[in-house]
Amino acid sequence: MLEKVVNNASEAIHDIADGAVIMLGGFGLCGIPENCIAALVQKGSKNLTCISNNAGVDDFGIGLMLKTKQVKKMISSYVGENAEFERQLLSGELEVELIPQGTLATRCMASGYGMPAIYTPAGVGTEVAIGKETREFNGKTYLLEHAFNSDFAIVKAWKGDTHGNLIFRATSRNFNPLMAMAGKITIAEVEELVPAGTLDPDCIHTPGIYVNRIFKGSNYEKRIEQVTTTQRD
Protein backbone atom coordinates (compact mmCIF):
# COMPACT_ATOMS: atom_id res chain seq x y z
CA MET A 1 0.00 0.00 0.00
CA LEU A 2 1.39 3.38 -1.04
CA GLU A 3 1.87 5.98 1.66
CA LYS A 4 -0.75 8.64 0.97
CA VAL A 5 -0.72 10.74 4.12
CA VAL A 6 1.07 14.08 3.88
CA ASN A 7 1.61 16.60 6.63
CA ASN A 8 -0.31 19.61 5.37
CA ALA A 9 -1.81 21.45 2.42
CA SER A 10 1.50 22.96 1.29
CA GLU A 11 3.03 19.50 0.99
CA ALA A 12 -0.06 18.17 -0.76
CA ILE A 13 -0.04 20.81 -3.53
CA HIS A 14 3.73 21.22 -3.84
CA ASP A 15 3.87 20.09 -7.49
CA ILE A 16 0.93 22.10 -8.84
CA ALA A 17 2.87 24.16 -11.34
CA ASP A 18 2.03 27.12 -13.54
CA GLY A 19 -0.48 26.22 -16.24
CA ALA A 20 -2.03 23.26 -14.38
CA VAL A 21 -5.66 22.23 -14.87
CA ILE A 22 -7.33 21.77 -11.48
CA MET A 23 -10.72 20.50 -10.38
CA LEU A 24 -11.92 21.97 -7.07
CA GLY A 25 -14.81 20.36 -5.24
CA GLY A 26 -17.63 22.12 -3.49
CA PHE A 27 -20.98 23.76 -4.13
CA GLY A 28 -21.01 27.49 -3.53
CA LEU A 29 -18.88 27.75 -0.40
CA CYS A 30 -20.00 24.37 0.96
CA GLY A 31 -17.42 21.59 0.99
CA ILE A 32 -14.63 23.59 -0.64
CA PRO A 33 -10.97 22.66 0.01
CA GLU A 34 -10.19 25.75 2.07
CA ASN A 35 -6.71 24.68 3.19
CA CYS A 36 -5.50 23.76 -0.30
CA ILE A 37 -6.82 27.00 -1.79
CA ALA A 38 -4.93 28.97 0.86
CA ALA A 39 -1.78 26.95 0.12
CA LEU A 40 -2.13 27.63 -3.63
CA VAL A 41 -2.42 31.35 -2.95
CA GLN A 42 0.74 31.19 -0.86
CA LYS A 43 2.57 29.10 -3.48
CA GLY A 44 1.60 31.53 -6.22
CA SER A 45 1.10 29.12 -9.13
CA LYS A 46 -0.07 31.10 -12.18
CA ASN A 47 -2.10 30.58 -15.37
CA LEU A 48 -4.30 27.96 -13.75
CA THR A 49 -7.42 26.52 -15.33
CA CYS A 50 -9.95 25.90 -12.57
CA ILE A 51 -12.90 23.55 -13.03
CA SER A 52 -15.42 24.21 -10.30
CA ASN A 53 -19.15 24.56 -9.86
CA ASN A 54 -18.54 28.14 -8.77
CA ALA A 55 -15.88 30.84 -8.54
CA GLY A 56 -16.16 31.53 -4.83
CA VAL A 57 -16.74 35.05 -3.51
CA ASP A 58 -14.43 38.04 -3.53
CA ASP A 59 -12.55 37.19 -0.35
CA PHE A 60 -13.09 33.46 0.03
CA GLY A 61 -12.75 30.22 -1.92
CA ILE A 62 -11.49 30.45 -5.50
CA GLY A 63 -12.10 34.18 -5.23
CA LEU A 64 -8.82 34.39 -3.34
CA MET A 65 -6.95 33.01 -6.38
CA LEU A 66 -8.82 35.34 -8.71
CA LYS A 67 -7.77 38.26 -6.54
CA THR A 68 -4.10 37.32 -6.91
CA LYS A 69 -4.51 36.81 -10.71
CA GLN A 70 -3.55 33.14 -10.54
CA VAL A 71 -6.48 31.89 -12.62
CA LYS A 72 -6.26 32.06 -16.42
CA LYS A 73 -9.53 30.27 -17.14
CA MET A 74 -12.64 29.35 -15.15
CA ILE A 75 -14.85 26.45 -16.20
CA SER A 76 -17.98 26.77 -14.06
CA SER A 77 -21.74 26.64 -13.97
CA TYR A 78 -22.46 29.45 -11.47
CA VAL A 79 -20.41 32.59 -10.93
CA GLY A 80 -22.89 35.15 -9.64
CA GLU A 81 -21.42 36.07 -6.24
CA ASN A 82 -17.99 37.37 -7.23
CA ALA A 83 -17.48 41.00 -8.27
CA GLU A 84 -13.79 40.48 -9.06
CA PHE A 85 -14.71 37.58 -11.35
CA GLU A 86 -17.15 39.88 -13.15
CA ARG A 87 -14.55 42.62 -13.50
CA GLN A 88 -11.91 40.26 -14.94
CA LEU A 89 -14.43 38.71 -17.32
CA LEU A 90 -15.66 42.05 -18.70
CA SER A 91 -12.11 43.41 -19.02
CA GLY A 92 -10.94 40.34 -20.95
CA GLU A 93 -8.42 39.34 -18.27
CA LEU A 94 -10.12 35.99 -17.59
CA GLU A 95 -11.25 33.25 -19.95
CA VAL A 96 -14.60 31.78 -18.94
CA GLU A 97 -16.47 28.68 -20.07
CA LEU A 98 -19.97 28.52 -18.60
CA ILE A 99 -21.48 25.04 -18.56
CA PRO A 100 -24.92 23.76 -17.52
CA GLN A 101 -24.55 22.30 -14.05
CA GLY A 102 -25.65 18.79 -15.00
CA THR A 103 -23.22 18.78 -17.93
CA LEU A 104 -20.41 19.90 -15.64
CA ALA A 105 -21.15 17.04 -13.25
CA THR A 106 -21.48 14.46 -16.01
CA ARG A 107 -18.24 15.50 -17.70
CA CYS A 108 -16.52 14.99 -14.34
CA MET A 109 -18.16 11.59 -13.99
CA ALA A 110 -17.19 10.58 -17.53
CA SER A 111 -13.57 11.42 -16.80
CA GLY A 112 -13.62 9.27 -13.67
CA TYR A 113 -15.22 6.37 -15.56
CA GLY A 114 -12.64 6.55 -18.35
CA MET A 115 -15.20 7.68 -20.94
CA PRO A 116 -13.92 10.16 -23.56
CA ALA A 117 -17.22 11.98 -24.07
CA ILE A 118 -20.96 12.09 -23.39
CA TYR A 119 -24.07 13.09 -25.31
CA THR A 120 -26.49 15.44 -23.57
CA PRO A 121 -29.61 17.38 -24.62
CA ALA A 122 -28.59 20.34 -22.43
CA GLY A 123 -27.45 23.30 -24.52
CA VAL A 124 -28.78 22.13 -27.88
CA GLY A 125 -29.88 25.14 -29.94
CA THR A 126 -28.06 27.64 -27.71
CA GLU A 127 -24.67 29.36 -27.70
CA VAL A 128 -23.35 26.40 -25.71
CA ALA A 129 -23.65 24.26 -28.86
CA ILE A 130 -21.69 26.54 -31.21
CA GLY A 131 -18.91 24.57 -32.92
CA LYS A 132 -19.84 21.28 -31.25
CA GLU A 133 -20.96 18.01 -32.79
CA THR A 134 -24.61 17.00 -32.48
CA ARG A 135 -26.29 13.66 -33.04
CA GLU A 136 -29.85 12.43 -33.11
CA PHE A 137 -31.04 9.55 -30.93
CA ASN A 138 -34.64 8.36 -31.16
CA GLY A 139 -35.71 11.58 -32.82
CA LYS A 140 -34.03 13.89 -30.27
CA THR A 141 -30.89 15.96 -30.80
CA TYR A 142 -27.98 15.61 -28.38
CA LEU A 143 -24.76 17.56 -27.99
CA LEU A 144 -21.33 15.93 -27.76
CA GLU A 145 -19.37 17.07 -24.72
CA HIS A 146 -15.86 15.84 -23.92
CA ALA A 147 -14.78 14.50 -20.55
CA PHE A 148 -12.51 16.80 -18.57
CA ASN A 149 -8.77 16.25 -18.63
CA SER A 150 -7.48 17.61 -15.33
CA ASP A 151 -4.00 17.35 -13.86
CA PHE A 152 -5.26 17.54 -10.27
CA ALA A 153 -8.53 17.16 -8.39
CA ILE A 154 -8.68 18.79 -4.96
CA VAL A 155 -11.55 17.75 -2.69
CA LYS A 156 -12.65 18.25 0.89
CA ALA A 157 -14.22 15.44 2.93
CA TRP A 158 -15.59 15.18 6.44
CA LYS A 159 -13.68 12.03 7.31
CA GLY A 160 -11.01 9.91 5.66
CA ASP A 161 -8.60 7.12 6.50
CA THR A 162 -4.93 6.61 5.81
CA HIS A 163 -5.72 4.54 2.70
CA GLY A 164 -7.60 7.49 1.20
CA ASN A 165 -11.17 6.27 1.69
CA LEU A 166 -13.49 9.27 2.06
CA ILE A 167 -16.84 10.10 3.63
CA PHE A 168 -18.56 13.36 2.71
CA ARG A 169 -21.12 14.95 4.99
CA ALA A 170 -24.49 16.32 3.90
CA THR A 171 -24.30 18.98 1.17
CA SER A 172 -20.53 18.60 0.77
CA ARG A 173 -21.36 15.38 -1.04
CA ASN A 174 -21.88 17.41 -4.19
CA PHE A 175 -19.12 17.70 -6.78
CA ASN A 176 -16.48 16.29 -4.43
CA PRO A 177 -17.03 12.54 -5.11
CA LEU A 178 -17.27 13.09 -8.88
CA MET A 179 -14.08 15.13 -9.00
CA ALA A 180 -12.22 12.76 -6.70
CA MET A 181 -12.57 10.09 -9.41
CA ALA A 182 -11.48 12.35 -12.23
CA GLY A 183 -8.08 13.86 -11.44
CA LYS A 184 -4.81 12.37 -12.60
CA ILE A 185 -3.68 13.17 -9.06
CA THR A 186 -6.39 13.53 -6.40
CA ILE A 187 -5.69 15.43 -3.21
CA ALA A 188 -8.10 15.14 -0.27
CA GLU A 189 -8.20 17.32 2.81
CA VAL A 190 -10.33 15.96 5.64
CA GLU A 191 -11.64 17.23 8.94
CA GLU A 192 -10.89 13.94 10.64
CA LEU A 193 -8.20 11.44 9.61
CA VAL A 194 -8.49 7.94 11.06
CA PRO A 195 -6.49 4.69 10.74
CA ALA A 196 -7.29 2.36 7.86
CA GLY A 197 -10.03 -0.11 8.77
CA THR A 198 -11.81 2.34 11.06
CA LEU A 199 -14.48 3.46 8.58
CA ASP A 200 -17.59 1.39 7.92
CA PRO A 201 -17.16 0.17 4.31
CA ASP A 202 -20.87 0.72 3.64
CA CYS A 203 -20.51 4.42 4.47
CA ILE A 204 -17.55 5.20 2.17
CA HIS A 205 -18.43 7.52 -0.71
CA THR A 206 -15.03 7.58 -2.45
CA PRO A 207 -12.80 4.47 -2.37
CA GLY A 208 -9.17 5.12 -1.59
CA ILE A 209 -8.03 3.82 -4.98
CA TYR A 210 -8.92 7.24 -6.41
CA VAL A 211 -6.99 9.27 -3.81
CA ASN A 212 -3.25 9.93 -4.10
CA ARG A 213 -2.68 12.28 -1.16
CA ILE A 214 -4.62 12.95 2.02
CA PHE A 215 -4.09 15.18 5.04
CA LYS A 216 -5.96 16.45 8.07
CA GLY A 217 -7.04 20.04 7.53
CA SER A 218 -7.60 22.68 10.17
CA ASN A 219 -9.20 26.04 10.94
CA TYR A 220 -12.20 25.61 8.65
CA GLU A 221 -14.30 28.74 8.42
CA LYS A 222 -17.21 27.03 6.59
CA ARG A 223 -18.62 30.37 5.58
CA ILE A 224 -22.29 30.64 4.61
CA GLU A 225 -22.63 32.28 1.21
CA GLN A 226 -26.16 33.61 1.60
CA VAL A 227 -27.84 33.68 5.01
CA THR A 228 -31.61 33.27 4.70
CA THR A 229 -33.87 33.53 7.71
CA THR A 230 -37.60 33.30 8.28
CA GLN A 231 -39.37 35.65 10.66
CA ARG A 232 -42.13 34.01 12.65
CA ASP A 233 -44.93 35.83 14.44
Image (cartoon, grey):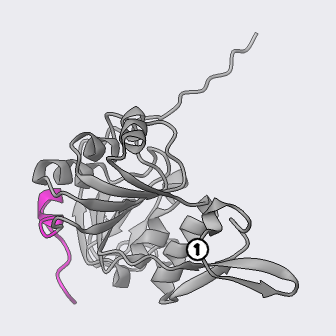
**Which residue range is magenta in the image?**
1-15
Is 96 positioned to the left or the right of 218 in the image? right
Q: Is residue 61 visible?
A: no
On the image, the x and y values in percent for residue 80 come to 52, 39
Q: Is residue 50 magenta?
A: no
Residue lying at 11% horizontally and 54% vertically, measured from the top left: 43
Q: Main secondary structure of the magenta part?
A: loop
Q: Which residue is mark 1?
A: 131
- Answer whether residue 9 is magenta in the image: yes
Tell me if 1 is positioned left or right of 10 in this view. Answer: right
Which residue is at a point 55% across and 84% down the rendered structure image? 117
In the image, is 187 to the left or to the right of 86?
A: left
User: Which quarter of the image is occupied by the N terminus?
Assistant: bottom left
Q: Quadrant of the C terminus?
A: top right
Q: Foreground: 114 or 209?
A: 114
Residue found at the far top of this picture = 233
Asked whether 16 or 180 is in front, the reply is 16
Q: How many marks?
A: 1
Q: Classify 12 as above or below 148.
A: above
Residue type, numbered disc 1: Gly
Q: Position of residue 150 (x, y in %)?
A: 35, 74
Residue 152 % position (x, y): 29, 71
